[in-house]
Amino acid sequence: MTTATIHPAAPTVGDPIAIDFPAPVVLDKSPDFEIVSQQGAHAVVRTFEAKPFVVSGRMGNVAFKNLVVPVRSVLKAKDAMTPAPLIAPRREAFPISVMIAVAVLVAVIAVVIAALLRRRKKPVEAVPEIPPAERFRAAVLALRDEADTPERWTKLADALRDYLAATGGAGRELTTAEVLARVRSEVVARVLRHGDLEKFSPWGTEGDFDAVADEVLGVAA
């Protein structure tokens, strides 16, 4: 037998009757009563007949047909049988959890919009492009002035290759022989060969780095 809590305990004709079940329920429609609302285990019904009615439905996987709801008349023995005007049932209170979730969502949207507006008000300053010649000269001078830098010849050759690639002289992917076939320059040849020897030869390389660095600056003049 299905058990439920009915409020009010002695409802009258036209009263909203709240029925709380022990589990979520789906009520069957009936000509004996009107389903005002149902949400989870809570349902509200009403009737306009002064007699008990039976509520049926399904609670989970269990069907029930035995919940009797008592209803009494509001009329006394000699009262007229004209029914009083109906009052629209009071809507169920909006769940507080939903209201909190909506408020949090509105607050988050407001913060995001404010952040976007602040970002739009701060224009991003463009960083000027450094010309390839200036980058190359700065790299060569830094290597020349720091004698304790490891693999100075290799780094000088890499800086020279970057400059030639940026100015269209020779691609960065070319070998030393391919670069020298396109760029006819003794100083370029010396720098690239010193770099290859330092990188690949077990004996390394020797030479006047400062003199070659000063000479290779003329490539970007």
Image: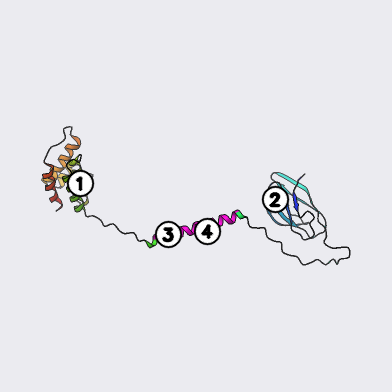
Report which residue position mark 3 lands on. Answer: 116
Mark 4 and mark 3 lie on one chain; the one further toward the N terminus is 4
Amino acid type indicated by mark 3: Leu
Report which residue position mark 2 lands on. Answer: 26
Q: Residue furthest top?
A: 202
- Decide which of 185, 72 is in the foreground and name it: 72
Q: Are marks 3 and 2 in contact (CB under 8 Å)?
A: no
- Give the magenta range: 97-119
Report which residue position mark 4 lands on. Answer: 106
Residue lying at 45% horizontally and 60% vertically, measured from the top left: 114
Query: Which circle, 4 or 1, is nearer the viewer?
Result: 4
Q: Are marks 2 and 4 in contact (CB under 8 Å)?
A: no
The quarter of the picture where residue 193 lies is top left
Report which residue position mark 1 lands on. Answer: 159
Residue lying at 73% horizontally and 45% vertically, measured from the top left: 63
Is 177 magenta? The answer is no
Residue lying at 73% horizontally and 52% vertically, measured from the top left: 19
